[in-house]
Amino acid sequence: MHDIAFVFAGFFVGFIVGLTGVGGGSLMTPLLIFFFGVKPHLAIGTDLLFAAFTKMGGSVALARAKVIDWAIVLRMAAGSVPASLVTLAVLNYVGPADPAVQRVMTSTLGAALLLTAVATLYKAIRGKTAGTPAATAIASHHPTLRSKVLPVVFGAVIGALVTLTSVGAGAIGVLVLMLLYPALSLPRIVAVDIAHAVPLTLVAGLGHASIGSVEWALLAKLLAGSLPGIWLGSQLMRKTPERLIRSLLSLLLAYAGAKLIAL
């Protein structure tokens, strides 16, 4: 019975991701912890690889459409991947199953969900915007010192946050990119965010696997449901009121974040 429930959970999260673009980690990790009783470190490690595999297909499609600004992806990854490795080293040293570490994970996860709720609501209010082609070219090919250094710094923060909680590579990453590159259109920002999330979640997920924080059988069940869920959600994306759905999701994420902090 649990097997079917895990597949359905994967389908549900995949459907929401396809429908709204909200990161799977912000939904899957609290779902595994609250509804299935999975230990936080196992939920986080498994969800990281779940995110890596689900976003990999999206990145390939975006790369073929030539909407990914790889220079920005590399700047973000220059901060996030080393920060992820450092965080993994700390987790390996103290032990991911240690009760104190579990408490840090759930509290940080709660805070990350609250930030994701704010970022999701911000995107819902702002709606779809588009930068001019000239402005986009300037932002991409003539970066200022600010646009060179800050992506690395924010990337490091996101890398540590994602490795510790599995949350942050989606909505928080988009919000950071919006602030750093206001000239870029929202579709290009989302494309950069998805492309950057793949190496980050893959490195973090494999790192968690190396310290025993991944349930491989659970991962297979979640992916079996998520892949058709993402396809269906993406098909219905243009037929749904995006702002309403994002606003409702922000409330759900805020509730889950507050509940985790209160644990």
Image: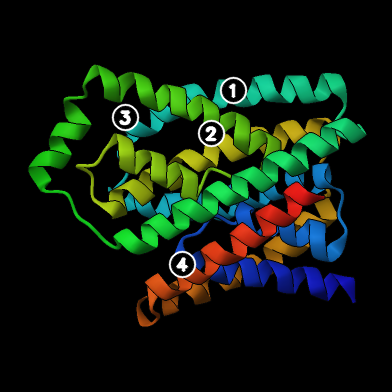
Tell me how far mark 4 sits from mark 1, CA to CA: 30 Å
Q: Residue 246: which disc?
A: 4
**Is there CB contact under 8 Å for labels 4 and 1?**
no
**Residue 150's image quarter?**
top left
Name the element at disc 2: helix
Tell me how far mark 2 sits from mark 1, CA to CA: 8 Å
Say which amino acid is labelled 3.
Ala
Tell me how far mark 3 sits from mark 4, CA to CA: 29 Å
Return the disc, 1 or 3, that comes first in the chain's sequence: 3
Q: Is residue 120 above or below residue 177?
A: below
Return the disc, 4 or 2, that comes first in the chain's sequence: 2
The residue identified by callout 1 is 83
Return the disc, 4 or 1, that comes first in the chain's sequence: 1
For the residues carrying marks 4 and 2, which lies nearer the camera in this image?
A: 4
Return the disc, 2 or 1, that comes first in the chain's sequence: 1
Residue appearing at x 31%, y 21% in the figure? 148
Tell me how far mark 1 sits from mark 3, CA to CA: 19 Å
The residue identified by callout 3 is 71
**Is there CB contact under 8 Å for labels 3 and 4?**
no
Residue appearing at x 52%, y 62% in the figure? 250
